[in-house]
Image (tube, rainbow, N blue to C red):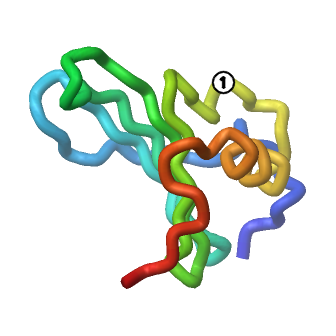
Amino acid sequence: MTDLTQKLANLVFNDVQMYDGDSQHAHHAPWGSITVVDRMTGFGWRDVETGFCDPDEVFWLATGNFDIRDFPDLSISEAIELIKENANTCIASPPE
């Protein structure tokens, strides 16, 4: 299991296949998943969104050009808290 005090900069974000022009980077671990998506919105503008999904599949999503990778000096636990604090679209949504 990854030590949550480890720096975010130490995580490896893998590229995920997306539509043309869009990108997704993800890190999956026993403590949850962090994803960063750069995509064209349905409103016609680009946005960068960072999501965190915990092991119980509860999800937080921070939009508005929020890329957690811009904070490499944070610990993993601090990064998770920052995502939760900036979540503005999905906030602790449990699975249906």
> Is 66 displayed left or right of 81 in the figure?
left
Quadrant in which the N terminus appears = bottom right
- Vertical comparison of 90 with 83: above or below: below
Q: How many numbered dots are placed on residues in this image?
A: 1
Residue 83 showing in the rendered view = yes
Look at 68% across and 39% down and name the residue there.
Answer: 86
Q: Nearer the viewer, residue 54 or 74?
A: 54
- Vertical comparison of 53 with 62: above or below: below
According to the image, label 1 marks what residue?
70
- Vertical comparison of 22 with 87: above or below: above
Q: Amino acid type of disc 1?
A: Asp
Where is residue 12? Give x, y as percent.
55, 46
**Residue at the extreme left of the image, as rendered:** 20
Look at 61% across and 45% down and name the residue there.
Answer: 87
At mark 1, the secondary structure is helix
Where is residue 24? Give x, y as percent.
34, 40
Look at 51% across and 69% down and name the residue there.
Answer: 93
